[in-house]
Image (cartoon, rainbow, N blue to C red):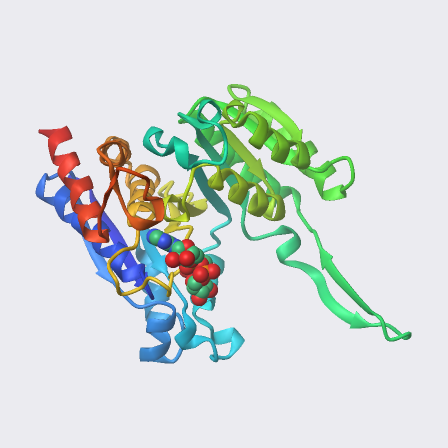
Amino acid sequence: MATHNLLLLPGDGIGPEVMAEVERLIAFLSKKSRAEFRIETDLCGGAAIDKHGVPLADETLAKARKADAIVFGSVGGPKWDKVKYENRPEAGLLKLRKELDLFANLRPAICYPALAEASSLRREHIEGLDILILRELTGGTYFGEPKEIVTLEDGQKRAVDTTVYTTREIERIVRVAFDLARKRSKKVHSAEKRNVMKTGVLWNEVTTAVHKKEGQDIELHHILADACAMQLVRNPKQFDVIVCDNLFGDMLSDQAAMLTGSIGMLPSAALGAPDPATGKSKALYEPVHGSAPDIAGQGIANPIAEIASFGMALRYSCDMVKEADLIDKAIANTLARGLRTGDIMQPNMRKVSTSEMGRAIVEDMEKLVA
Ligand code: NAD
């Protein structure tokens, strides 16, 4: 039986509450002898500031480097609002992404049939929706230099952000897109703005070249990022994998995600390059939501985003695709049975707590494997 080394970083606010439901799932999978998990749990964000004075201690980073996957909760909250900017809770997460070079951000947008009514689009457009936005996470407009605001001679200010991409950065994210598409429907849309941006021209050229050389089994479409935003609302089911740069990915993934309902439902993954020796990538899995200080400590947070993030860890880091599918099925079944946390509550449904939702999902998995 394979052994997987997981580092759990629950963080702050509702992070530990939703992580408890992942621990319940790990206990279930271990009991069923589906795999052996070696678990370490550590502090990150505000909780780490309280204990170590920094949002990510060196020893935690060392554990993260060794782990097969990091399962992350959420960080931040008003308690740490006055902490120095470089030391704020979120800096712990950013440091993890940077130190492990987690350049590929996977954001699935899946519409569970039971929640189709919660979308702002009509049911026929989103029922059965299952798309994956792949965002380049460590380059582009958010990191390019110069990045500054300068005061001009006449007293006006001038702000500059710089969008930079190299061939290598584009090649490696496109390869990830093709690899992911091979496990899905083998269709990739590459979104850029080649009509007005030089980075768009290079993005398009490099994507075409990688496709020609290594991706002939993939159906590749080039689409302008603004047209992609429009098509996501007009006919989202035409897409499967969408790959794009950091800035467009930020926008498109939020847009795609909200087609499917609440922020409490959305998982994500950030992957690094595969190790040439082992083929394994560094990886961090986390819900899209934050620490939700407004509901923390009440036991009412929706644990599905965290549970689905753990499902992604099984799929992409642990080679446990069957178990990942099982989790997705159990989430769908539990919602179909009418269980709802407050954020996704609908008329005539049964309102449940964080732990009741987590327990119901595990009970459904029990039935599915019986
Ligand atoms: P948030 O995602 O924490 O909350 C936004 C709204 O969604 C709130 O009303 C919250 O109650 C609700 N919500 C979020 N997750 C939910 C869940 N699982 N179940 C039910 N309702 C849920 O975003 P925010 O309020 O802008 O930020 C709060 C704190 O979290 C800030 O300190 C922010 O910096 C931090 N944050 C952290 C991360 C991260 O750790 N990756 C991401 C975003 C925000």
Q: Position of residue 319 (x, y in %)?
A: 29, 36
Question: Residue 109: x and y, percent?
Answer: 44, 36
Residue 248 place in picture, x, y as percent? 62, 44
Q: Residue furthest front?
A: 347
In the figure, residue 219 lies in which quadrant? top right
Q: Residue at x 51, y 79 (%)?
A: 84
The quarter of the picture showing ligand 1 = bottom left
Judge by depth and name the residue closer to the eye, 278 or 166: 166
Q: Is residue 199 above or below residue 19?
A: above
Q: Left or right: 321 with respect to 280? A: left
Q: Quadrant of the C terminus?
A: top left
Q: Answer with the quarter of the image where residue 155 lies.
A: bottom right
Give the total of numbered labels. 0
Can residue 55 be seen here?
yes
Is 4 or 90 nearer to us in this picture? Answer: 90
In this orientation, which residue lies closer to the viewer: 277 or 62?
A: 62
Residue 215 pos. (x, y %)? 54, 24
Extreme residue in the right direction: 154
In terms of image quadrants, where is residue 318? top left
Camera sees residue 99: no
Relative horizontal placement of residue 212, taking residue 177 as reference (left or right): right
Who's the residue at 36% across and 34% down the image?
115
Residue 215's place in the image compared with 295, above or below, is above
Residue drawn 40% across the image and 25% down it: 128
Image quarter hosting the N terminus: top left
Apparent side of residue 309 relative to residue 129 in the rendered image (left or right) = left
